[in-house]
Image (spheres, helix red, strand yellow):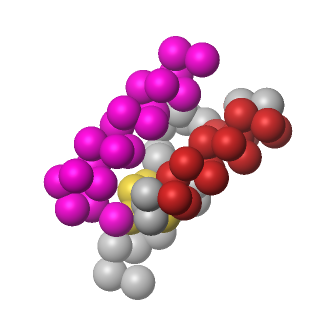
């Protein structure tokens, strides 16, 4: 639960700073390690706040 709270705080803070696209590259923070319900709840929260979560590498220039 702690890691989810940290992530939510991180993403909402990023949103306040104007970041809309966030890329998780740290394998220690891996969305697939959450159980399905928590993962979907977390992604729903991010969606509500219009934060797009990437869990695969991508170019910021795409």
Position of residue 24 relative to residue 62, above or below, is above
Q: In this figure, what is the number of numbered marks?
A: 0
Q: Which residue: 36% across, 33% down?
A: 9
Could you tell me residue 35's position as x and y percent?
79, 31
Q: Main secondary structure of the magenta part?
A: helix
Residue 23 occupies quadrant: bottom left
Extreme-top residue of the structure: 2
Q: Which residue: 34% across, 37% down?
A: 10
Extreme-front residue of the structure: 48
Quarter of the rendering occupied by the N terminus:
top right
Looking at this view, is 53 or 40 the one in front?
40
Residue 39 within the magenta-colored segment of the rendering: no
Position of residue 9 relative to residue 50, above or below, is above
Extreme-left residue of the structure: 17
User: Which span is picked out in magenta?
Assistant: 1-20
Q: Which residue: 61% across, 42% down?
A: 42
Q: Which residue: 68% across, 42% down?
A: 41
Extreme-right residue of the structure: 36
Quarter of the rendering occupied by the C terminus:
bottom left
Looking at this view, is 53 or 16 the one in front?
16
């Amino acid at each position: 639960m702690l890691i989810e709270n940290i992530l939510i705080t991180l993403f909402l803070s990023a949103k306040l700073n104007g970041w809309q696209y966030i890329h998780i590259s740290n394998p220690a923070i891996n969305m697939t390690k959450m159980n399905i319900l928590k993962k979907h709840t977390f992604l729903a929260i991010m969606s509500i706040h219009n934060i797009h979560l990437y869990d695969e590498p991508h170019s910021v220039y795409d």
